[in-house]
Image: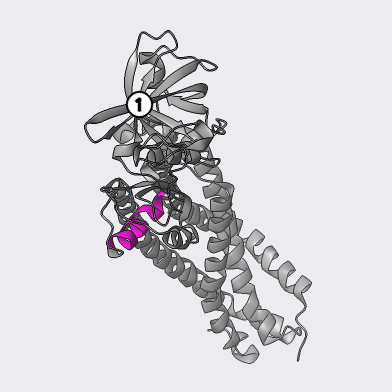
Amino acid sequence: MTRIRWSQVLNLAFRDLAHGWGTTLCFSVAVAAALLPLLILFGLKYGVVSNLIETLRGDPNVREIRLVRDTQLSPQWFETIAARDDVEFILPRGNFLAASVRLRSPDGRQLLDTRMVPTTANDPLIIGIAPPQGLSEILVTTRVAIEAQIEVGNTVELIIQRTVGEDRQAVRHRAKVVGILPRDRLQTDDIFVTPAFEDAVETWRQGFAVPPLDWVARDGSRTLLRPERKSFSSFRLYTRDVRDVPVLRDALLLDGLDVRTRAEDVIRVLIIERALSIVFFAITVLGAVGFLLTLGLHLLASVSEKARELAILRLLGLTTAEVSLMPSIQGMVISGVGAVMACGLAAISQPIVNTVFSGLGGLEGRVSYLALSHFAVALGATVLAGGVAGSIAGLRATTIEPRKGLRHD
């Protein structure tokens, strides 16, 4: 196999481009003019979709899947769901009716009807806030804190009631407020407790005793204990990403569970993303075809015009492979220079585009965004396309015979 003398081939290709620098510059500008609109369009597509997706990701409630009505879910069911790759957080939850408690404010003047929400570490709703521990710590929402004039560190009284026959019984439990949820995360009258405390309240309301809290059973004894739990009534469930919500929702529906989600909001964004992708793909294909044909025909014409020079190079010892590589190298250089120009202009235009389209459709932040990886891909793809376009002329160069190339018409 004949060894290709790369240094010599590259030297000849670059010197030829430098000799016709005017033509080289014109075609590089043409490449930049074709690539720049594609980069700006992609920046808008990526920026708009990313903006919409990040807005949804910023609200953990979008990733929540709620059970509409209580059912019976086994511990094995929870293990199966927790093992899914699209599930970030799942926690068993007790009976909906058993979750209501009354909260008395620290000064004793306010009495609020609230609902318990079990929580643990890694709960998406309390990221950045330490979860409650044990049976006597709670978190409250901002709404509860305002209505009951609660501050972190205050102690409140929880009143739990149950009906036994014709009698209504109640227990009182004092709990320390260890955190307040920001208003933008939840706007309800909820208090966050440990699963153990929620289970204790449900157990007592079912008529059993709760020895750790010294709550007696419905018959007044401390020995009537609830049998081992074999099922749960509901759950708290969050997907790993907003894109997982429709998929997991459909899986739960197929499992016979009636759930409520914000999947429609996610699907709406995904439809926008798909539509913009189709438009961008169509424009890119048309632009690429035009670019390949234009540059390929230019290099092909250049080879035909320089048939005599190429023939002399063949006589001086250049191999067929070396001659055929020169148009491809020139195509890559022309494309590379044009791509660098387009990437530079696109980077400079980003602040201008974001200013012009600021507030488009109610979007906040960047409407157009191009990362370094996008520029790298655009540069690499354009250089590769230039090499492909030059290969057409390279094939033509292999057909030039030295003796015919030296003839004068």
Observer able to see residue 287: yes
> Which of the 4 image quarters holds residue 190?
top left
Q: Secondary structure at mark 1?
A: strand
- Residue depicted at x 42% and y 61%: 77
**Callout 1 amino acid:** Ala
- Residue depicted at x 78% and y 85%: 3
Residues 101 and 403: in front is 101
Q: Is residue 366 left or right of residue 374?
A: left
Assign the N terminus to one quadrant of the image.
bottom right
Q: By what rule are the colours in the image chosen? A: one colour
Residue 93, percent from left and from top: 40, 45
Up/down of 147 relative to 124, above or below: above
Residues 374 and 215: in front is 215
Look at the image and give the residue range highlighted in magenta.
Answer: 242-253
Observer able to see residue 24: no
Residue 145, percent from left and from top: 41, 17
Residue 83, percent from left and from top: 50, 61
Up/down of 290 relative to 170, above or below: below
Task: Say which residue label 1 marks.
Answer: 170
Q: Is residue 259 left or right of residue 138?
A: left
